[in-house]
Amino acid sequence: MTDTEQGELIFQVKAPEGTLSAPECKGIRSTRDFPVDLSTLSREQIEHHYQAMRNSHASLSRSRGQLQRRSRELTLARERFLETLRSYEGRLMALGQEKAEALRIAQEMHRELETFEDKQQALDGLLEELDAAKAEAGYWSIFSITRLIERMRRLLRGGDEA
């Protein structure tokens, strides 16, 4: 068995002198390459065609084996690739859930800060009113201070300034 320049295999069969040349196997040969009726062929011709058929069958078997091996390798590679994709998908889902949770927490903190700022502004306003009421003298200033202190208590307890 020798390799040609094209990468095809040629099977050498020693034939007695005066007989047909060695059958070649250049890959898979069609059944049309072989005679249908053997009755008109000599024994040497029949042996020649038989050997060519065997060589063609051997080449076909090797090709089939290579195809099956490559198919198995590609199937394994595809399965590994899909497994990797699934792991990436799982990681991305986990990251997405973490980001969603972080966003929810940030939004809650923002709402709490806004509420705190609103209360702080309301408290500052009440303190200014209290300072203004302290500057005044008389019954109405005591009444205003009492009302302002009550509003401060409500505000500090979590209620509205009203």
Image (cartoon, rainbow, N blue to C red):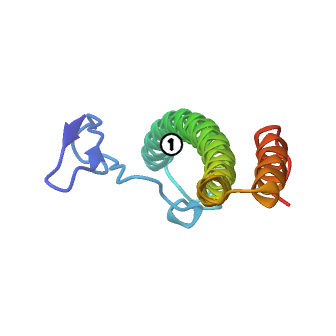
Residue placed farthest to the bottom in the image? 32
Please state which amino acid type lies under the numbered disc 1.
Leu
Name which residue lies at 67% across and 55% down: 126
Viewer-closest of 23 and 27: 27
Residue placed farthest to the front in the image? 138
In which quadrant is the C terminus drawn?
bottom right
**Position in image of residue 44 (x %, y %):** 43, 44
Viewer-closest of 141 and 72: 141
Tell me if 77 is positioned left or right of 9 in this view.
Answer: right
**Position in image of residue 71 (x %, y %):** 54, 41
**Position in image of residue 72 (x %, y %):** 56, 34
Q: Is residue 70 above or below residue 136?
A: above
Tell me if 119 is positioned left or right of 24 in this view.
Answer: right
Residue placed farthest to the left in the image? 5
Name which residue lies at 59% across and 54% down: 131
Label 1 sits on residue: 67
